[in-house]
Image (spheres, rainbow, N blue to C red):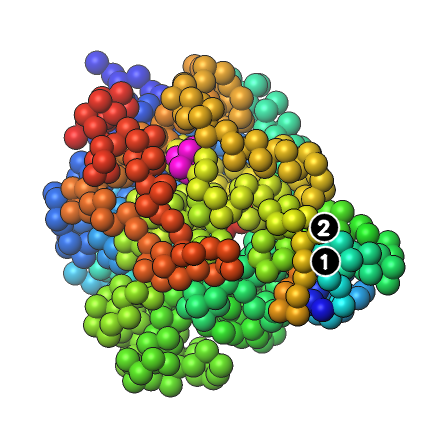
Amino acid sequence: MEKALMAGYMNRSLDVDLSSGRVSELAINDEDLQLYLGGKGIGTRLLYDHTPAGLDPYDPEMVLIFSTGPLTATRAPQSNRFVVTTKSPLTGAVANSTCGGSFASKLKKAGVDVLLIRGRADHPVYLEINEDDVQVKDAGHLWGKGAEETQELLPKAFGKAVIGPAGENLVRYACIVSEERLAGRTGCGAVMGSKNLKAVIATGKRKVEIMDDAAFSKLQTSINKYLRSHPMTGDVLPRLGTPSLVNITAGRNILPVNNFQRGTDRRAVNISGEKLAAEEMEKRSGCINCPIVCGRSVKLKGKIVKGPEFETLGLMGANLGNFDLKLVLELNQICDDLGMDSISTGGSIGFATELTERGLLPSDLSFDRHEGICDLVRDIAHRRGLGDDLAEGVKRMSEKYGGTEYAIHVKGLELPSYDPRGCYGQGLEYATTNRGGCHVQGSTMFFEATGPLNIDPLSVRAKPQLVVMQQNLVAAISSSVFCVFATYGVIPGFIYRLNPQGLVARIIAQAVLNSGPILTMVLKTKAPLKILWFEKFLSYIFGRKVSLGDFIETGERVFNMERLYNMREGFTASDDTLPERLLSEPTFKEAERGVPLDEMLPKYYRLRGWDPDGIPTEKTLKRLQIRH
Amino acid sequence: MAILIPTYDLAQEIGAEIEIDAATVGELLSIGRERWGKPFEDTVRAAAIVVNGRAITRLKGKRTPLGPDDTVWLVNASAGG
Ligand code: SF4
């Protein structure tokens, strides 16, 4: 019997074996698509199902999965994204990273929901997908080239996902580059490099079926309008982009300075988003079909290049004691072209600098002088000299040289640019996020420190609930696939307009802080309504009702699926922790220690339906319909 | 005496780092209003006032005492990653 086609999907996924060159259809059952949607959800399910326990990330049998979602290649705002999933060579845990640009949309228009790549080519290749025509082609002329030149040399009409030299040389935090966007974290680019795969390119003209097209279009128009008029998505992000966070984090004492030795520095204004916008910005840039357009291009040595995000300003700037904006611009551009995650790069150099200053590593690194740093970054990508050690990341360097107490990583992933000692909920989020120290799997710091509310950052109250809620929401968003910046529009605009010192703002912040029991109830209730635009878009595309409760439950399922994968690979509750420095050294006068993780973790486990050892109970897995 | 670090926009008008002789946040705000008028007034209405990283709403509000080592930042809300 012919299989019924599901709206929102192309109903075709590919399994490409680079060892044999064989291309076949990848069978994904409809039930899994309904349970995991796409993107990160289906990627994690497939990673679990298609690899045996303990498989090395660089083993040819490791899979590298590019997945779109039901909303990819539609006109829904912020939806043209793909997710890459594999096992991280940096952490040994689940690796996933989302990326904008046009590749996601073109891959789906080529008629592909999921592209699973396994095996290893015996020479550099790239994969070209033009609807039914799928070819593995020689990439000898591209090998060794930067991400920018590689993309220029590939055919124009195709969407591209490429690696730079860092991926080729198996830098453990190499990323995948698509136009000027990056699937940045966890080292997916190194797994791609281990397969001798330089690029995946795709194009096509197929259309996504939307069951209720009229309602979908109407919603699209109204959400675009809403996002454009919202103070965050319509003003701050377009005007200043993420770099606006430099001054805010410095003011809030959560900007990592000199390898997280302190949380602020008055010189931060020299690398601020405002200064960047006033002095360096040439134009704005964004992903297709996004009304926010949060990226910025800058002029560097006479060329227009992508400007840095906040994370790069934090990790390659303040965290290295570097407050020279032009130098950060240059480092950012070098990292992007080499195909290297600037967060892990900055984290690794920061750690090596502290090791040097403490006499544990023989090098010239210093938080006060930065000459030669651009060359060092190039050395990392090519694994030359000290660069070879740095290419291994902070965790492995600390195992070799010492300094584990100030090796700033979680589960092996270097921390982003928010010091959790000034936002405890963010600390819990770092400790529990499945891919390791990451800020975009919940962004709890937004509620505590960087957003319009100030839900006491130095309190543990209601934080476990907030973290669980946010992690579930973001997991669902990344499975649909929307951009996580969509979450900032969820907070009503009027809250941003409140006087932060005013009574109303204070009452709201205090109410959230006191709302632990209510939030616990909310977490246990499956809201039957359609409230946010995410589930509404999904309802219209599928032609069946998807409630907010269904949507959040999908996120919870995906989060637990990731947890199961990590447990299978040997992770335990002891990995749900933070670096010693962040647990024990306070950065605030009134704090006696760093992040009081022990006060939050047991509650977090209970809320998740996990046992005291952080293992999902059978009851939880059954409720979430997770097969294992 | 405390150091005031204004938002970037305000800093274009009043300077990036200003020493102010004030014993409390309230006093600092009065001095600011007097010295810089409307631009200062508009900024403090929209920005969070933060002393050594702590919002004054979590301290003693305008009565928060200031000493010579204290830094007062005016910060806007943002988001990103
Ligand atoms: S908000 Fe920024 S990153 Fe997200 S889709 Fe829009 S342009 Fe891309």
Is ligand 1 closer than 8 angstroms to the Cβ of mark 1?
A: no
What residue type is disc 1 on?
Thr
Q: Where is residue A135 in the image (x, y as percent from the top left)?
A: 27, 48
Identify the disc placed on residue B24.
1
Q: Where is residue A333 in the image (x, y as percent from the top left)?
A: 49, 68
| Residue B76 seen in the figure | no
Q: Residue at 57% x, 19% y: name it.
A: A214
Apparent side of residue A10 relative to residue A548 in the rendered image (left or right): left
What residue type is disc 2 on?
Lys
Q: In which quarter of the image is the C terminus of chain A?
A: top left
Residue A118 among those drawn in magenta: no
User: Which chain hosts label 2?
Assistant: B
Q: Where is residue A2 in the image (x, y as percent from the top left)?
A: 25, 16
Q: Do the residues labelled 1 and 2 touch (CB within 8 Å)?
A: yes
Q: In this rendered view, identify the residue nearer to me: A266 or A386.
A: A266
Q: Residue at 34% x, 66% y: name it.
A: A406
Crowd around label 2: few <14 · some 14–19 · many ≥20 (10 Å): some
**Image height check: is A312 above or below A486?**
below
**Image height check: is A221 above or below A246?**
above
> What residue did someone put label 2 on?
B62
Q: In this rendered view, identify the residue nearer to me: A458 or A382.
A: A458
Q: What stretch is highlighted in magenta?
A: A464-470
